[in-house]
Image (tube, rainbow, N blue to C red):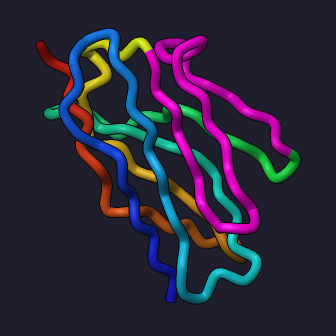
Amino acid sequence: QVQLVESGGGLVQPGGSLRLSCAASGSIFNITPMGWYRQAPGKQRDLVATITSGGTTNYADSVKGRFTISRSNADKTLYLQMDSLKPEDTAVYYCRWTKLGLDYWGKGTLVTVSS
């Protein structure tokens, strides 16, 4: 089994920063981090940022220049550095990994941007 645990969410004021982490454990041989997604209340889950096995990154237009995705292969951890946060970034953030063609999702961590 694969377990994904996200952390780092919380309440932050507009303009602030947060760093999300997603640690993989369990049967993690050959598991690969794919990216971060978010779901705001009443909306669908949307892509935030992805990272390929070669390290190429891709971002939603709404977060370009503010968010940075990275990973630690040694620690099997995926990160999302979020700077210059806006109220519209408020959502539950999910990490996604893949292994042998199967997708694995974390349970999500809530990010609230409010004054």
User: Residue placed at 69% from the left, 72% from the top?
Assistant: 31
Q: Quadrant of the C terminus?
A: top left
Please tell me whether residue 35 is drawn above or below residue 32 in the rendered image. above
The residue positioned 65% from the left and 67% from the top of the image is 76
Relative to 9, residue 59 above or below: above
Q: Position of residue 1 (x, y in %)?
A: 50, 89
How many marks do you count on the picture? 0
| Magenta-drawn segment | 55-83
Q: Residue at x 24, y 27 (%)?
A: 90
User: Left or right of 14: which side holds 56?
Assistant: right
**Where residue 56 sits in the image (x, y, percent)?**
81, 36
Q: Quadrant of residue 17?
A: top left
Determine which quarter of the picture holds residue 65: top right
Q: Left or right: where does residue 42 sit relative to residue 52?
A: left
Residue 54 vertical placement versus 86 (above, below)? below
Identity of the residue furthest to the right in this view = 54
Residues 45 and 106: in front is 106
**Residue beneath the point at 52% across and 32% down:** 81
Task: Give the x, y percent position of residue 43.
Answer: 23, 32
